[in-house]
């Protein structure tokens, strides 16, 4: 039908539709996005759909092999751990700790970062210079070290490490948002707006912020992969999630004792962390490429 | 011009160190437990001693005087005692820091030596099969949780194949007294041992941790160099150079490489902080007697003076490396020298 149309109508797609159009042909990135959506779904509904109770210990089924091995059972697809807990249920619940909490942490950090970054980006002179140098200091303290200090002050626990990770991610966001805003302020349309008599606040709210979603989404994917790796690393060191909590990093650490007898108890949680971070990076790269193409088109 | 720049940087360095010491000093108040024992590291303090220490530490003065007093003690080398061993924290750090420096510097060198050529290769042959292979391997390595990779490699190379040792810096057969803390220098200085065999053994111990630690920065470097080189090759001056009739190699070397590698110097400094984080994890897994493992042990033991001192030393190290790469970057790049 389209070919028969005599009067060719000018039709501009919306920016999001254009982005999606350039995102979809990148199959790996799309695949990553699908995995991420599944994980997000799992993070929300896993307590309701897990086949067994993730904390239920079963003395008769210790270190049961995964079902693809001869000695496994179909009702325990990934086998059980050294206390007889169903590994699949634990891994599913782990999605909400490792992935869900990471998303929450990054969102929180991003909101605060947006606020402070806007302050840093819109101010100039001594104020901004002092602020930036303090940020440089915060950027140089390694995130794990910062987490260790926070754990030393507040005590170990999943929630405390979330604070630590939020704090560790914050400087990146402030820097990123500040730079992006500075970049925006140089644009001609901002100058035009200013000539119309808009004050700083109006420029920030109605011109700069709507243009920030591109750099923000890239920052978000980068921060999310860091956050997941950090949560897992802290869990692995025993500073984050504590013993029965099925967080993936701490599951790897728990299963280390039985690595000879049951290598899958170490391999599977690690594999999940890897897949999650990989798909985040795939989506991030795909977004980056799609944005570049959208600008080009 | 350049002197003014250096003076400005030095001033900035001083400012950052003041902020850092204020932060570390305030931790004394934030950590649970008694203020006096947090500051000195002494465990069982009698009431009379407590009074006396409060006097010498200046705790009955204002908080700014306390901070100045704290700085004076830092400069005098009196960093307090470790809760667990009741030895000076500074001497303990002196023992563990060289091991970490050794591991991180080898890993950093390896990541530069492997990462830069591969990144350049991928950028030059953009969108070819080679580029796709390198980029996807880099992406996979970039997403790998380092502790898991370490465990898998230990399982494979140490336990299944038996090629490499699992932990430590040197086999127990070799008795090498720690003098400098750097293992190869110590082996050279050690009396009456088979030096070549000891060095070979140390090298075997070093291989796996270095490779694991280098994996993340290498992949970051590949991605960064590729990105930077692709950007540079898109510039107009490259087209101009081609149009002038320069050969491909000349264009790449004279105009491409030099401009593409400039941001890399800066990236090294930025990477150093994440390298230290990863080094801490690697040290724990490989029982490498470095500052990372020492710090993690300190947190299990609630060893607050040690955590403070470790924070101070590691952050200072990272800040200095950052500042150094920043200065090197400015020396090489006139565009960054705006004042």
Image: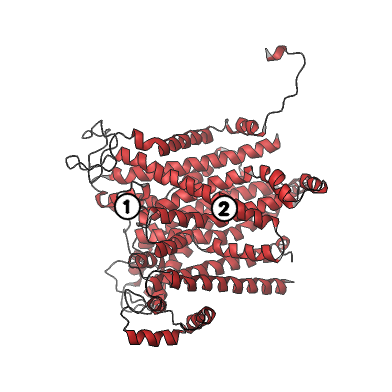
B181 vs B197, nearest the viewer: B181
Residue at screen point 57% across, 38% down: A286
Taking B336 as reference, is B140 above or below it?
Answer: above
How far apart, in angstroms, are the residues tagged by discs 1 and 2? 32 Å
Q: Position of residue B265 (x, y in %)?
A: 60, 60
| Tag 1 secondary structure | helix
Q: Quadrant of residue A175?
A: bottom right
The chain ID associated with circle 2 is: A
Which numbered disc covers residue A112? 2
Q: Residue furthest right?
A: A195
Q: Position of residue B119 (x, y in %)?
A: 57, 49
B102 vs A190, nearest the viewer: A190
Residue at screen point 27% across, 43% down: A55
The mark nearer the N terminus, 1 or 2, is 2
The answer to whether residue B250 is seen in the rendering is no
Drawn side of residue B24 relative to residue B157, left or right: right
B45 vs A292, nearest the viewer: B45
Q: Quadrant of residue B40?
A: bottom left
Q: Position of residue A285 (x, y in %)?
A: 56, 41
The answer to whether residue B153 is seen in the rendering is yes
Q: Quarter of the image for the C terminus of chain A: give it.
A: top right
Q: Quarter of the image for the N terminus of chain A: give it.
A: top right
A139 vs A131, nearest the viewer: A131
| Tag 2 secondary structure | helix
**Mark 2 crowd level (few <14, some 14–19, many ≥20, 10 Å Cα):** some
Q: Which residue is mark 1?
A: A253
Residue at screen point 40% across, 75% down: B38
């Amino acid at each position: 039908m389209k070919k028969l149309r005599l009067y060719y109508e000018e039709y501009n797609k919306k920016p999001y539709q254009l982005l999606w159009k350039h995102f979809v042909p990148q199959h790996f990135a799309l695949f990553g996005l699908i995995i991420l959506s599944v994980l997000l779904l799992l993070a929300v509904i896993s307590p309701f759909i897990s086949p067994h109770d993730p904390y239920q210990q079963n003395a008769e089924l210790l270190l049961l092999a995964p079902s693809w091995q001869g000695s496994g059972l179909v009702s325990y697809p990934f086998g059980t751990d050294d206390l007889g807990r169903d590994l699949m249920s634990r891994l599913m619940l782990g999605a909400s700790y490792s992935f869900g909490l990471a998303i929450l942490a990054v969102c929180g950090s991003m909101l605060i970062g947006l606020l402070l970054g806007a302050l840093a980006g819109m101010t100039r002179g001594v104020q901004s210079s002092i602020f930036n140098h303090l940020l440089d200091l915060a950027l140089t303290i390694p995130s794990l070290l910062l987490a260790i200090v926070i754990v030393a002050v507040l005590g170990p626990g999943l929630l405390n490490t979330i604070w630590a990770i939020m704090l560790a991610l914050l400087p990146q966001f402030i820097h990123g948002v500040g730079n992006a805003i500075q970049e925006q302020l140089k644009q001609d349309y901002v100058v035009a707006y200013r000539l119309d008599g808009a004050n700083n606040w109006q420029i920030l709210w109605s011109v700069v912020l709507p243009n920030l979603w591109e750099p923000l989404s890239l920052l978000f994917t980068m921060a999310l992969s860091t956050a997941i790796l950090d949560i897992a690393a802290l869990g692995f060191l025993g500073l984050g999630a504590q013993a029965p909590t099925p967080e993936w990093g701490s599951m790897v650490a728990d299963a280390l004792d039985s690595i000879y007898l049951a290598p899958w108890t170490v391999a599977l949680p690690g594999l999940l962390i890897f897949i999650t971070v990989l798909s985040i990076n795939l989506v991030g790269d795909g977004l980056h490429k799609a944005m570049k193409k959208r600008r080009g088109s | 011009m350049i002197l003014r720049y250096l003076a400005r940087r030095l001033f900035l360095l001083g400012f950052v160190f003041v902020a850092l010491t204020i932060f570390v000093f305030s931790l004394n108040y934030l950590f649970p437990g008694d203020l006096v024992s947090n500051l000195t590291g002494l465990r069982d303090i009698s009431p009379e001693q407590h009074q006396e220490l409060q006097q010498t530490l200046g705790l009955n003065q204002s908080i700014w005087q306390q901070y100045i007093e704290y700085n004076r003690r830092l400069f005098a080398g009196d960093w307090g005692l470790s809760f667990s061993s009741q030895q000076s924290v500074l001497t303990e750090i002196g023992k563990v820091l060289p091991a970490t420096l050794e591991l991180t510097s080898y890993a950093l060198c390896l990541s530069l030596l492997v990462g830069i050529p591969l990144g350049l290769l991928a950028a030059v042959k953009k969108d070819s099969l080679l580029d796709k292979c390198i980029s996807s391997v880099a992406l996979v390595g970039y997403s790998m949780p380092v502790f898991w990779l370490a465990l898998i490699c230990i399982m494979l190379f140490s336990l299944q194949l038996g090629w490499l040792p699992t932990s430590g810096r040197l086999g127990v057969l070799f008795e090498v007294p720690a003098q400098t803390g750097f293992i190869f220098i110590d082996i050279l200085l050690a009396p009456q041992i088979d030096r070549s065999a000891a060095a070979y053994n140390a090298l075997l111990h070093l291989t796996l941790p270095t490779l694991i630690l280098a994996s993340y920065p290498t992949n970051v470097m590949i991605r960064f160099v590729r990105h930077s080189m692709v950007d540079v090759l898109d510039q107009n001056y490259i087209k101009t150079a081609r149009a002038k009739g320069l050969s491909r190699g000349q264009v790449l070397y004279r105009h491409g490489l030099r401009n593409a590698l400039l941001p890399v110097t800066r990236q090294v400094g930025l990477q150093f902080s994440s390298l230290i984080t990863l080094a801490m994890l690697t040290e724990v897994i490989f029982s490498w007697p470095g500052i990372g493992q020492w710090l993690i042990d300190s947190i299990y033991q609630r060893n607050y003076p040690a955590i403070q001192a470790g924070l101070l030393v590691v952050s200072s190290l990272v800040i200095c490396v950052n500042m150094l790469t920043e200065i090197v970057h400015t020396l090489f790049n006139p565009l960054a020298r705006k004042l």
